[in-house]
Image: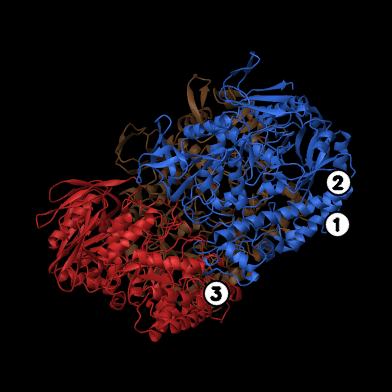
Chain colours: A blue, B brown, C red
Amino acid sequence: MAALRSRLGGRLAYGGDYNPEQWPEEVWAEDVKMMREAGVNLVTVGVFSWTLLEPDPGHYTFDWLDRVMDLLADHDIAVDLATPTAAPPAWLPYEHPETRPLLADGTRLTFGSRQHYCSSSPIYRAKAAALVERLATRYATHPALALWHVNNEYPGVDGCHCDASAAHFRRWLADRYGDLDALNRAWGTSFWSQRYRAWAEITPPGKVLGAVNPAQRVDFRRFNGDAALECFTAERDLLRRITPAIPVTTNFMASYKFLDYWKWAAEEDVVALDAYPDARDPLGHVKAAMNYDLMRSLRAGRPWLLMESATGPVNSRRRNSARPPGQLRLRSHQAVARGADSVMFFQWRASAFGAEKYHSAMVPHAGADSRIWREVAALGSELRDLAEVGGTRVESEVAIVWDWPSWWALEEGGRPLADLAFHDQALAHYLPLWQANIAVDMVRPGADLSRYRLLVVPNLYLVDAEGAANITAFVEHGGHLVMSYFSGIVDENDQIILPGGHPGAFRDVLGVRIEEFNPLQDDESLTLRWSDDGSVSTASQWQDLMRTESAEALATFTDGMFGELPAVTRNTYGHGTATYIGTQLDTERLASVLTDAVATAGVRPVAQVPEGVEAVRRHAADGGSHLFLLNHTDAPITVELPTKTALHLPPQGVTILREEA
Amino acid sequence: MAALRSRLGGRLAYGGDYNPEQWPEEVWAEDVKMMREAGVNLVTVGVFSWTLLEPDPGHYTFDWLDRVMDLLADHDIAVDLATPTAAPPAWLPYEHPETRPLLADGTRLTFGSRQHYCSSSPIYRAKAAALVERLATRYATHPALALWHVNNEYPGVDGCHCDASAAHFRRWLADRYGDLDALNRAWGTSFWSQRYRAWAEITPPGKVLGAVNPAQRVDFRRFNGDAALECFTAERDLLRRITPAIPVTTNFMASYKFLDYWKWAAEEDVVALDAYPDARDPLGHVKAAMNYDLMRSLRAGRPWLLMESATGPVNSRRRNSARPPGQLRLRSHQAVARGADSVMFFQWRASAFGAEKYHSAMVPHAGADSRIWREVAALGSELRDLAEVGGTRVESEVAIVWDWPSWWALEEGGRPLADLAFHDQALAHYLPLWQANIAVDMVRPGADLSRYRLLVVPNLYLVDAEGAANITAFVEHGGHLVMSYFSGIVDENDQIILPGGHPGAFRDVLGVRIEEFNPLQDDESLTLRWSDDGSVSTASQWQDLMRTESAEALATFTDGMFGELPAVTRNTYGHGTATYIGTQLDTERLASVLTDAVATAGVRPVAQVPEGVEAVRRHAADGGSHLFLLNHTDAPITVELPTKTALHLPPQGVTILREEA
Amino acid sequence: MAALRSRLGGRLAYGGDYNPEQWPEEVWAEDVKMMREAGVNLVTVGVFSWTLLEPDPGHYTFDWLDRVMDLLADHDIAVDLATPTAAPPAWLPYEHPETRPLLADGTRLTFGSRQHYCSSSPIYRAKAAALVERLATRYATHPALALWHVNNEYPGVDGCHCDASAAHFRRWLADRYGDLDALNRAWGTSFWSQRYRAWAEITPPGKVLGAVNPAQRVDFRRFNGDAALECFTAERDLLRRITPAIPVTTNFMASYKFLDYWKWAAEEDVVALDAYPDARDPLGHVKAAMNYDLMRSLRAGRPWLLMESATGPVNSRRRNSARPPGQLRLRSHQAVARGADSVMFFQWRASAFGAEKYHSAMVPHAGADSRIWREVAALGSELRDLAEVGGTRVESEVAIVWDWPSWWALEEGGRPLADLAFHDQALAHYLPLWQANIAVDMVRPGADLSRYRLLVVPNLYLVDAEGAANITAFVEHGGHLVMSYFSGIVDENDQIILPGGHPGAFRDVLGVRIEEFNPLQDDESLTLRWSDDGSVSTASQWQDLMRTESAEALATFTDGMFGELPAVTRNTYGHGTATYIGTQLDTERLASVLTDAVATAGVRPVAQVPEGVEAVRRHAADGGSHLFLLNHTDAPITVELPTKTALHLPPQGVTILREEA
């Protein structure tokens, strides 16, 4: 990132996906002129240009791209050059039909969209490598080249079931388990007579009557991600060899369930995010904040790139409403506040054709005489003045545990409560911290927790021994823990951690023992009585049938089929405390539990501001900082500053205060 | 039609599908006796008799059909003889499995229903032609033969994805585009690297991750229809060669999304409709009226045939309620009023077996001692007296634009508003005209509009240059236009009509410029203030962010995120006016806009009758006419006639007045 | 069963599925110790152990099972030994991919779950037989062996569509129909040109446009069941040959739509049931009672085995709530009351892995220090004292007709009312009889009805001539009949029983003639006036348009489109009466009609007890009996006994009274 920042003259990056291949060349001149007007200094080029660069198999031609790169260089616009490997040309599936993904139901995907390749295909990989090598070699020293953008939004939801994928899955399993006995143990194949006597017998999980072995499914998710990640690292290795000074990234899809971005981020030079929060979702800005914090956390707090966002509506929702006036500015600053060193959009100029022509752009169909263009130009101008924010850091003393394999395992079939969804739970725990303007990082269960005072663990269903020990040690050494129900139940192979009551991984640190899980019916709720003040609240969705051992009850169920039982507990363990929430609290009570824990941990908010104002601080190495104050409401708000001056934030307004060291 | 009318002795056709193959021959004598009783003069024979006529491949036998034809001729019942090509015998898919349609997901359809053939299959086509030729030759001079009924309810929803279909699709594309460069431009294949370098690389749109190229999908819809239409015209050509005097038709399925009936109607001698409005749908009779007007319009106002309808319930709905008493008569007359020269049913005698045995019939399971039979016999008697209506015409000065490719493109994925459905919109615009008893035709965008004073254009998303110019010229020359939002956005290839603001095709004639589309959320509504009287109304679903250029605002949005903006406008253009509706009006206001436009255009209702009474007039060549008055309510209604006499219509009652020239 | 009872020392069986292969051998000693503590005397072993017994194709090894059998024998725990044929090892689909079921959409099922075999596969059948023969031979004289448990929960929902299945289907059809003409007649193939000229042309019903021939679909359901049943009888024959003294069973899935358990029960020595009523369903206990009565009836009242049930939640529902305290005891006794000679669970020890690890067990994850274990142990102790109930009989004078082919045909597509579901209707008719504590059997239409006074026939859509004649004769000879609408409409081939009005099979005995069916719309209801007292009630969902012939109207529709029409009728026929219900009555009126019929038939309740108490009696051969009184409410109830003493039943309480002869 330092390289990129330096390349941009220390400025934040501003720009978007630039697809000149969709337009006659006479439009290009207007493009660069308008880019200059709007302060654009970085554009992503070539994301879907494979067919232009290799029109026939093995015949490469770069003339078109040369002209684009030269034009941009001439206008001092840096290029985030994409490897176009997300969309092979029509000749690949035509000449090699077996490169198309095969779904679990036996359907082969066809050409006509994008991402129509099997990650495990040797042919695809070879063709991709050959092109990337030529691309990198040709532009290695081009003055426009500033960043590599590998592929595009790697998918992971389905996985390929073709023979090549199955063979690859088996090799991956052999690497993971060493021998079949280990795999049979890990997958619990003594259940339903599923023992494998030969690697060749193993297949991707397909269609069955009933339910597939859940450990097999979780491993197939791991494998799918790794197969795609291999595609990424293969390209990255080529790029690093040829252009060692140019950073490499790929664009993530925020809290995307199907790829473990902890693993991905470790393989790239900078995290890049495509962020499309729903403009009309009342919690859209909170979800955005959570995603930004996640992106920042993926590489330990380093600045990241907002690689794609929308100037207006997307076209993938049922009702793609226009963006409210002012929101583009507000939300763009929000990303910067939470660690982005760029504001970029998909795309520069709205397409006239294709599947995404109703996706908004920096230059809309209506052209320059339009609200959107005026907002885009104004934002570019404003960001030019924020250069010194680049490279600064957000600092947090609170962390939320976010783990992909646990997410996958939690949402497999056959659980006590099918409705329990990780993302919703993570958001529910994030929301009160966001409302209180508490800075938060996300961490893996096994991460270095030494910088944190409070660790929040929403429904960490699956945890390996190392993760469990790490969390336990965190408390023992004085950390404060808040953990929600159905955590620590299974190990990395989705096997119940035995013996004794649940949660096997955390019984000691929590000081409780759970005999049974009691998911509540849709319309069922229970009453909680809180020990501190005798007040009551309502619980829903889940009831642990739990006994305290060393813990004390903070709240007790007072009704329901099982009578009085502890519901929320706190345990002192070593030098720290562990609070456990054995039910779904209402929004207010979950907030109280978390803000009490914040207070106990001695964590302070970023700033004392009225409700509706988001306060985030980026810290510079010199001890100075920028305080971002963002008014997400439709009303003006006055913020009393510590300096006793009052700051007036208009509706949807933003103010950025420069604080000296 | 004149030939058919003459063959029927000038009478309207009355009858139904007659499937004697389902019954022992001793029942046939009872059939013809009852047909005579009921006034049946035309029956459709042989729709599903391929297996009887060609029991083994290449072995033809017509004895059975000879006996049926002779029996009917003996009783002076004319025959609408069907080519049985909608349901090949079991031996075709058995001997040629590749003739079965292949779905996009790779599933081959099986035998056991009907329509189990690929329209592009050379084998199917050859077998169909061989049979049709023999059938036509054999009965060319048979006295019973009055009409050819080709195939049955050609389907179009899915399309076949087999190799033969794919090759046919490529030939069709080569015909349409000439060369690959033209196709690549039309499909916008520079988006997502989709350029084709060889025809062979192109496939039908199949399953993908994300979205298929929308132009490819719209072209595949066009192709599907054309492939089926080729099957029709191939049979028709044979029939015309052998029996040039016998008219040829096939039965349409009303406002069926998947076939462009404008193209089909041009290829046949008379339009035939299968109409199954829901007997219990409160708008069932209005939908029926709209479909009848569409059928009449398909061949420029010529009389059409109601080929299939139901005496009682169908069996395809979730709850197939019985038909209310009197509705059979009322709704049958409604079809005649709107231009039908026949009333026919599926089917003569209710089946004892098979997939449609609970579909009602002229002779129900309960036999002749039944309400249904009594209503059928009475209706037949009444229609005998309406002979002089045959051949007369409905005349209209208002037209609604109805275009299939626009329908297809509008409902593709990735649009601003996924819920926007053409049929619903067409009905919403038709309803107030129906309520006001304004006679209406449907037209294509490029049709001759010279006979119309008012043109209503509901959401014509896609329009080619010729259509746009035609509509513009209509206004310029003094016509009045009412157009709804999201019209004129893309050309025939689903490409945005650029440059500048929307709607590219109609900006001049409408005198407005739209910068952004703002689909509203489900529960969101806006307030409109109307310029003429300051009244307010509610808008929903859609908001154009629009500026007037030469137009004036008839109504203005007064709230919402974007403040005051024009919502409904009127532009004077040449000698005419163009009213534009940039939102979804409520039912009452849409009615006002349309009836105001009717008044401005100087169009008069068919008759001044109380609400709930439908008035339709058929005009004879001699200047005389028949006025149909239909009471669709459950209460008696008195109609004051211009002659100052009062006419009493009972609930569900019908009166037909003969008006002299 | 006598053999089993004797093997268990006259005691009821108590235990569950024991899967020691999931645990290290050191756990086994604890298992048998805890089994003894809980009074376990029968465990099901080996249900999923094929891979352990035949780890490689043709290599058998029984050491593991020897040790398990010996250990159990040593502790006097009898074994229900399973043939493990429900889950072939991974090597079977690997070496013989064609043994995997093929779905109608062309998808092959994969390995990774269970039941991944085609019932028609010769290879599967041969491998199963070879293993079963060795298993039976090895343990033929083992002291632990008490019962054979063949396969597990045979499925039937989808059916296999592979070539072997298709060929098998054709052989089955040839057996059923003898020649193709008969098949063509039975299937009504003159509809839609579906005639077959060769057996080879026939396929399983697959995917089609529109609807498959319904007779073909019903026959395919019959065939699917028979194909699975052949697998069962093949194993049974081997077992009977080798161990003639050991009874053979397989476990049924209660009112499972897809297998005709009348046919299955006739082939086994004792009926065994897996029962998982929803613990939180307000009607869960009534559905359980109905299922238990059905199981008892399948073999003419003989005691049956509760083979699987749950100590707590299952894991297949969306929200698997814990079981209320006391319910395990109450519901277990309910099964015994209704004829079970066992209480058994899936499974002994909760799995740590696999797809069912959250299914509750006798030993939960929490171990012996748990509520569940304490309830399990207490129940075992209590059942030990109920030994004398074993072998006794429930006696009924009322029967409900329950017929699988009618169920299948009723729920095919294209019916007048798609929502009409047999199971719901059977339950609606069962409920008031259960509430009145009337003992009820289920019977086939053709069963010996001589022991019954009242026959209840819910919506028997399909009935063959023998069944119709049998029901008619029942009434003629003095029986009382209550029949609901849409009964007797079609014969065994789904062909309308003609001529004349509906219901063709029962017009005479009912004394009515139905002209039309009028399914009501979702929100539509009609008013009924009852002849006896002039009261009114509400009808919904269905209206027969009916005339009485010899019957009298008990209730009359007073409104709706068709005016006054008979709705509920009674006919005197021979020495009996036939009540017909031509609409969907509300719950109270259906109860009145049924309890009136009970009274007319002179049938007495088991006992006069307050509402909410279930009373069931098991009669011993010596004339003595046990009266089970079960309080399903959450309140205490006092029952006045005929002996004038009062019995206090606590909430969820059970009392069993020993009554002398």
Q: Amino acid at mark 2?
A: Pro
Q: Cα distance, mark 1 to mark 2?
A: 26 Å
Are dots 1 and 3 on a single chain?
A: no
Q: Cα distance, mark 1 to mark 3?
A: 46 Å
Are dots 2 and 3 on a single chain?
A: no
Placement of C535 over or under C394, stated as above or below: above
- Judge left or right: residue C536 versus residue B47: left
Chain of the residue under label 1: A
- Judge left or right: residue C481 versus residue A480: left
Q: Which mark is residue C99?
A: 3
Residue at left 40%, top 66%? C33
Chain of the residue under label 3: C
Q: Amino acid at mark 1?
A: His
- Judge left or right: residue A102 versus residue A571: right
Closer-to-camera residue (C357/C421): C357
User: Which quadrant does the C terminus of chain B fall into?
Assistant: top left
Residue A41 percent location from the top left of the image: 81, 33
Q: Which mark is residue A59?
A: 1
Q: Residues within 10 Å of mark 1 (few under 14, many from 20)?
A: few
Q: Amino acid at mark 3?
A: Thr
Depth check, mark 1 against mark 3: the one in front is 3
Depth check, mark 2 against mark 3: the one in front is 2
Q: Residues within 10 Å of mark 3 (few under 14, many from 20)?
A: many
Q: Which mark is residue A244?
A: 2
Chain of the residue under label 2: A
List the single residue furthest toward the right: A141
